[in-house]
Image (spheres, rainbow, N blue to C red):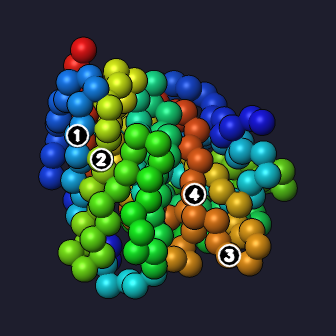
Amino acid sequence: DAGVTQSPTHLIKTRGQQVTLRCSPKSGHDTVSWYQQALGQGPQFIFQYYEEEERQRGNFPDRFSGHQFPNYSSELNVNALLLGDSALYLCASTPWASGGRYQETQYFGPGTRLLVL
Amino acid sequence: AQTVTQSQPEMSVQEAETVTLSCTYDTSENNYYLFWYKQPPSRQMILVIRQEAYKQQNATENRFSVNFQKAAKSFSLKISDSQLGDTAMYFCAFMKHGAPGKLIFGQGTTLQVKP
């Protein structure tokens, strides 16, 4: 059973550029959440996708956008990169609902390390 | 808004001993979930244990157990018989019921298990 996968593992960009990160959820999961983890800090929730729509959003600017595809995989796009966007970007998946109640456990991928120079 | 606080940035423990990591949280919600996640240097976030707020019984998973004090908004993690593989950063996290997937994390505690 494949877990959550993310690509690429590492990425270097320069200020002002745009970046796209990709995530494939765990088999059987249809909901994808994205988190930003600065070095030495806890992850911060960016947004969540279910049924190809953004369902919840954290306190991140519009430069951060996403997409979910019919196969439940997801992309995170960041425009006009800033030095402060350097971080580990984590993707997590979960089933939206099972047996009539929300599934509360997130399964995380290994992350994409983004460095903005 | 909910907040999660881990007041111990770093801790160490000798192999085979017991260690407790602290976590407090602030919320006005009555139904929620609490989690402890482990992030080794390989950086894959792994679920250690979870607790539903409506359950009074403390969760236990093998060598890991929690002390959940709802009134005090405290959620500590006890690791018994510590092993070298327990070396990692540990995060306490909160999730409101009805908001699946939106985890609020603490700052983390780096645990070093010494041989």
Mark 3 secondary-structure assignment: strand
Query: Residue A78: where, in percent of width, then height?
Result: 52, 47
- Which amino acid, mark 2? Lys
Location of the N terminus of chain B by quadrant is bottom left
**Chain holding disc 4:** A
* Mark in front: 2 vs 3: 2
Judge left or right: residue B61 versus residue A67.
left
Give the Cα separation between the discs numbered 1 and 3. Answer: 34 Å
| Mark 1 crowd level (few <14, some 14–19, many ≥20, 10 Å Cα) | some
Q: Name the residue under label 4.
A: A105
| Mark 3 crowd level (few <14, some 14–19, many ≥20, 10 Å Cα) | few
- Determine whether A1 is above or below B75 in the image: above
Mark 2 secondary-structure assignment: strand
Residue at coordinates 70% horizontally, 66% vertically from top-left?
Answer: A96
- Which amino acid, mark 4? Thr
Location of the C terminus of chain B by quadrant is top left
Residue at coordinates 54% horizontally, 33% vertically from top-left?
Answer: A110
Circles 1 and 2: CB distance less than 8 Å? yes
Give the Cα separation between the discs numbered 4 and 2. Answer: 20 Å
Judge left or right: residue A42 versus residue A75.
left
Q: Mark 1 points at which residue?
A: B19
Q: Mark 3 points at which residue?
A: A101
Q: Which residue lies furthest to the right in this view?
A: A70
Circles 3 and 4: CB distance less than 8 Å? no
